[in-house]
Amino acid sequence: MQFTEERLKEIILEGAKVKLPAESIVAETDLIADLGYDSISLIKLLSDTEKAFEIRFEDEELVVDVISKYGRLKESIMNKLSI
């Protein structure tokens, strides 16, 4: 599947404990503090993201600083896809 920001936000909102509109997810949105993600839901998010965008995260990329902020996660995916 081609990368779209809308699709990434849909995937994120599917696992969020807090319901809010996709437009309110911005680069600074913290998936843990703002959306209620925990370690298990982050793993599911990464798995769903890998499937949706046909990418693979390496173990060394799976650090909280990279995967807990929407903007950093989006940037990581875009780099993998060379967008």
Image (cartoon, grey):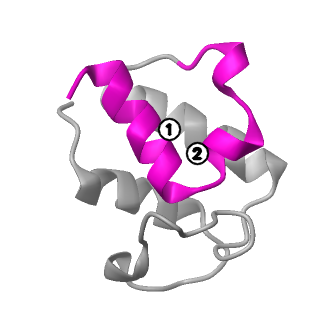
Relative to residue 1, is residue 73 depicted above or below?
below
Residue 59 lies, in percent from the top left, at 71, 15
Q: Residue at x 63, y 43 (%)?
A: 67
Residue 13 placement, left or right of 82: right
Q: Secondary structure at mark 1?
A: helix
Q: Quadrant of the N terminus?
A: top left
Relative to residue 28, is residue 80 depicted above or below?
above
Residue 10 placement, left or right of 35: left
Residue 82 placement, left or right of 30: left
Report how many numbered discs are placed on residues in the image.
2
Residue 34 lies, in percent from the top left, at 66, 77
* Residues in magenta, as a range: 57-83
Residue 38 placement, left or right of 72: right
Q: Residue at x 37, y 21 (%)?
A: 80
Label 2: which residue?
45
Residue 20 lies, in percent from the top left, at 47, 86
* Residue neighbourhood size for the residue with mark 2, other residues' Cα within 10 Å, grouped as few (<14), some (14–19), many (≥20): many
User: Do the residues under discs 1 and 2 have CB atoms within 8 angstroms?
Assistant: yes
Q: Quadrant of residue 19?
A: bottom right
Q: Residue at x 73, y 64 (%)?
A: 32
